[in-house]
Image: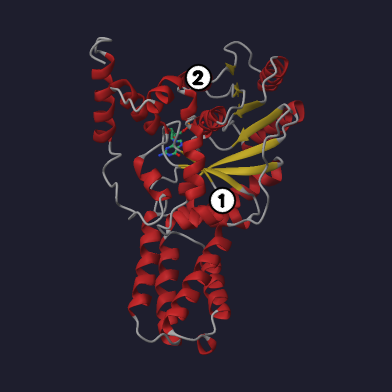
């Protein structure tokens, strides 16, 4: 789970608080010291941590609060709100519009996870029922088109690119035009992440942007770079009109708190975080559910959303069987396949309020996934009668 360690340390501080029979200023200071140390260890900027501490101290007036239980609740609530403020840029994120052709352009440094993110985003919107296509406008890196093609094919997403055309602006324009003609609803254009010189990279981004006039420019950034995220996000924001940010490689990275809070400070809304190498390893980002999950309080809205994406009702055979009280081996196989589409089991566990953070520890390990796949292979090799 993302920032699991940070969440565990803050919860430990809350647990200490609940053991205290009398809560005074000294106890509050000790708790805040633990929380601030945990945030600093996760690479959150020292100024922001100090701000959080001062705000909690200002909001909690120990003298005026009544019973001990009440004090505990107030402290927890105020800390929760301040943690939300830390990662909330306070800016409404862009959303694609129905009935319109939505053009998204992604920018970011090579290796940040841009191409992977393009397919993850396309697959996310595809699951939500959008007609979406991908364009590879990276002609600088050899193999960029092949990578996008492979990812897109695996995720069943239509794509456009060229082995012969060297001008990325031309490819971007052609790809966008093609998908527009074919009445697609969203097109995502992947651009280059490296050039001989940084100025050339920014020039190319500007030219592509001027040519395709994107509705949203998504800046894809490696979340493991910690506090330097703020400087990088600002540089890209100044060069092209960045509308939103995707932070990648947030899976289990102890320092991820630095990137999230640093980007939030640039007022660029983080719309998704990448949580692994697979196509479903992407999570919608919004401050409250994120902090709630981090503290093991779940995210029911996110869970409902994820289950809706599975569109179980589209599986007519299963629905018919279930209505008759029948559950066959094939139904079991289909169900397992759907569950695997939700992403890692730990991710799902994190959305269920009250479930211990490590309840499903190890279950989404390579071995667990391999076992599920083995079951499916065994099933697929059975005769119709056996099923
Ligand atoms: P690009 O050069 O920016 O297009 O980067 P790629 O999409 O080729 O990704 C670079 C590497 O990062 C690849 O090995 C990806 O599998 C990996 N990667 C991308 N996103 C994530 C993520 O969210 N988590 C992890 N663990 N790896 C990621």
Above or below, comparing residue 152 to residue 247 in the picture: above
Give the residue furthest to the bottom: 63
Quickly name the residue at label 1.
286
Residue 340: quadrant of the picture = top left
For this view, does 352 lie left or right of residue 380?
right
Q: Which of 385 and 266 is in front in this view?
A: 385
Q: Nearer the viewer, residue 6 or 330?
A: 330
Residue 131 x, y percent position in the rendering: 62, 23
Q: Which of 318 and 25 is in front in this view?
A: 318
Q: Which of marks 1 and 2 is nearer the N terminus?
A: 2
Which of the labelled discs sits on residue 37, or is there none?
A: none
Query: What residue appears at the point 44 percent right and 81 percent down from the top-left corner?
Result: 28
Query: What residue appears at the point 60 percent right and 10 percent down from the top-left corner?
Result: 164
User: Distance between the Cα atoms at labels 1 and 2?
Assistant: 28 Å
On-image quarter of the C terminus? top left
SS for callout 1 = loop
For this view, does 190 lie left or right of residue 382?
right
Ligand 1 neighbours mark 2 (CB distance < 8 Å): no
Quickly name the residue at label 2.
156
Ligand 1 neighbours mark 1 (CB distance < 8 Å): no
Q: How crowded is mark 1: few (under 14 residues within 10 Å), some or many (20 or more)?
A: some
Instruction: Mark yes or no: residue 216 visible.
Output: yes
SS for callout 2 = loop
Residue 91 x, y percent position in the rendering: 67, 53
Above or below, comparing residue 100 to residue 178 in the picture: below
Which of the four quarters of the rendered structure image does ligand 1 lie in? top left
Residue 113 x, y percent position in the rendering: 49, 35
Query: What residue appears at the point 60 percent right and 44 percent down from the top-left corner?
Result: 245
Q: How crowded is mark 2: few (under 14 residues within 10 Å), some or many (20 or more)?
A: some
Residue 348 x, y percent position in the rendering: 40, 44
């Amino acid at each position: 789970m993302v920032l699991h360690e940070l969440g565990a340390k803050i919860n430990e501080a809350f647990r200490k608080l609940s053991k205290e029979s009398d809560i005074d200023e000294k106890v509050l200071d000790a708790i805040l010291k633990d929380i601030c140390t945990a945030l600093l260890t996760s690479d959150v900027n020292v100024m922001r941590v100090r701000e959080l501490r001062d705000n909690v101290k200002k909001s909690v007036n120990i003298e005026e609060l009544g019973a001990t239980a009440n004090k505990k609740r107030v402290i927890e609530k105020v800390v929760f709100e301040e943690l939300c403020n830390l990662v909330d840029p306070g800016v409404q994120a862009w959303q694609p519009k129905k009935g319109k052709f939505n053009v998204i352009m992604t920018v970011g440094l090579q290796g940040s996870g841009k191409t992977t993110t393009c397919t993850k985003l396309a697959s996310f919107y595809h699951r939500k029922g959008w007609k979406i296509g991908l364009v590879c406008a990276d002609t600088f890196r050899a193999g960029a088109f092949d990578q996008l093609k492979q990812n897109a094919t695996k995720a069943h997403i239509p794509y456009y690119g060229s082995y012969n055309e060297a001008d990325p602006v031309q490819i971007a324009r052609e790809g966008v035009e093609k998908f527009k003609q074919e009445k697609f609803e969203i097109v995502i254009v992947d651009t280059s992440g490296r050039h001989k010189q940084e100025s050339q990279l920014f020039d190319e981004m500007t030219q592509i942007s001027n040519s395709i006039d994107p509705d949203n420019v998504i800046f894809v950034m490696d979340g493991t770079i910690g506090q330097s995220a703020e400087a990088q996000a600002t540089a890209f924001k100044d060069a092209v009109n960045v509308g939103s940010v995707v932070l990648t490689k947030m899976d289990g990275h102890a320092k991820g708190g630095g990137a999230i809070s640093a980007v939030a400070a640039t007022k660029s809304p983080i719309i998704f975080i990448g949580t692994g190498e697979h196509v479903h390893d992407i999570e919608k980002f919004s401050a409250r559910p994120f902090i709630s999950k981090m503290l093991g309080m779940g995210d029911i809205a996110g869970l409902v959303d994820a289950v809706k994406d599975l569109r179980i009702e589209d599986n007519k055979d299963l629905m018919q069987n279930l209505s008759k009280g029948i559950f066959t081996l094939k139904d079991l196989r289909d169900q397992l396949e759907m569950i695997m589409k939700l992403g890692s089991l730990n991710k799902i566990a994190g959305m269920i309020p009250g479930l211990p953070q490590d309840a499903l520890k190890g279950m989404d390990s390579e071995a667990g996934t391999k076992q599920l796949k083995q079951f499916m292979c065994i099933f697929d090799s059975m005769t119709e009668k056996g099923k």
